[in-house]
């Protein structure tokens, strides 16, 4: 099954319920990605891994009534959140669909533009996924996505601090690749996959910003069970969290987190 582990994770209420807190980080990236996407009036646009739909709503407003945006995700809960937000925003040229872009086609294709904010790092067959994304684009259509730089450049991430407390991830199965937020930290891998999928004009730009956010933007105690931390080790986990957050602390439950990410751009040259 395509992306079985990620589909399970992104449909686990213990994870998806925390997403609005996590958005305090991703929302800081959105203006940078939106500028790179550069949506134009009348365009048809695909949002890959749309999550709670915030960026899809902004793009829908930019393409106007003559344009169309389709947001796709594997998470039923996040799609429900995105639909509620779109309805509240009064955006009518935007639809959401439960799709896995590793293998699924999308109603509304071919698109002028596809974009993703931290979604493409969760394909367990990325070569197949990028080829499928290209098939959804018209000749000359563009793909733009943001992905995190290496974990060393993103010290806010709690994963390395918890390494000794959580079980190691299972090895990828036959024909599968590891997934995760920092999988494209080495840009050569991402550009290589894009070129192998038939994209041309592949370029990337590095970005470094900071965001002020509460501790819950990077870790929540309710996450311990989901991460596999045993009950007897939770006091130790609490100490790890406190020590981890100390370096970013700037005020009462306020922290300044450095975010390092890349924005990739590529083009579908024409005939499939």
Image (cartoon, grey):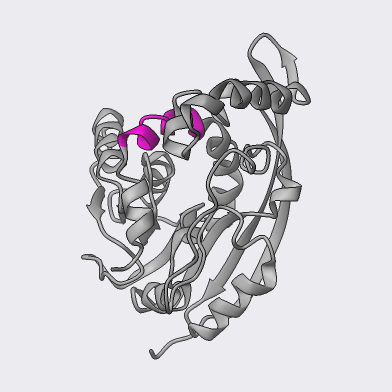
Residue 140 on the magenta segment: no
Expressed as whole percent of the image width and height from the top left, the position of residue 156 reads 68, 36
Residue, far bottom: 271
Quarter of the image containing the N terminus? bottom left
Q: Quadrant of residue 194?
A: bottom right
Q: Quadrant of residue 139?
A: bottom left
- Residue 19 picture location, percent across and down: 42, 34
Residue at 32 percent across and 54 percent down: it is: 7
- The residue nearer to you, when weighing 255 against 30, is 255
Tell how many labels: 0
* Residue drawn at (26%, 48%) of the image: 93
Q: Is residue 148 above or below residue 125?
A: above
Which secondary structure type mostly characterizes the magenta part of the structure?
helix
Could you tell whether 2 is left or right of 139 in the image? left
Work out which quarter of the rendered image holds the C terminus and state it. bottom left
Point out the residue furthest to the top here: 252
Residue 40 on image: x %, y %: 44, 57
Q: Nearer the viewer, residue 28 or 58?
A: 28
69 or 135, nearer to the observer: 135
- State the residue at coordinates (53%, 36%): 27
- Apparent side of residue 80 relative to residue 152 in the rendered image (left or right): left
* Magenta range: 13-23
Q: Is residue 61 left or right of residue 144?
A: left
């Amino acid at each position: 099954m395509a992306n079985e582990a990620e589909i399970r994770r992104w449909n686990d209420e213990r994870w998806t319920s925390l997403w609005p807190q996590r958005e305090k980080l991703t929302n800081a990236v959105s203006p940078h990605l939106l500028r790179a996407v550069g949506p134009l009036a009348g365009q048809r646009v695909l949002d890959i891994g749309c999550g709670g739909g915030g960026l899809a709503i902004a793009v829908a407003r930019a393409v106007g009534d003559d344009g169309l945006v389709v947001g796709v995700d594997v998470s039923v809960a996040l799609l429900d959140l995105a639909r509620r937000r779109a309805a509240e925003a009064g955006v009518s040229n935007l639809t959401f669909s439960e799709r896995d872009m590793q293998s699924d086609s999308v109603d509304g294709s071919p698109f002028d533009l596809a974009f993703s904010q931290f979604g493409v790092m969760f394909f367990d067959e990325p070569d197949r996924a990028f080829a499928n994304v290209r098939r959804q684009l018209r000749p000359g259509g563009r793909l733009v996505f943001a992905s995190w730089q290496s974990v060393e450049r993103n010290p806010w991430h709690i994963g390395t601090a918890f390494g000794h407390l959580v079980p190691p991830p299972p090895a990828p199965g036959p024909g599968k690749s590891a997934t995760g937020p920092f999988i494209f930290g080495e840009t050569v891998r991402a550009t290589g996959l894009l070129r192998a999928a038939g994209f041309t004009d592949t370029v990337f730009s590095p970005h470094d910003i900071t965001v002020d956010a509460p501790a819950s933007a990077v870790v929540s105690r309710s996450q311990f069970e989901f991460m596999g931390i045993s009950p007897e080790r939770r006091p130790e986990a609490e100490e790890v969290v406190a020590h981890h957050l100390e370096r970013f602390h700037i005020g009462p439950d306020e922290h300044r987190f450095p975010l390092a990410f890349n924005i990739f751009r590529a083009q579908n040259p024409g005939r499939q």
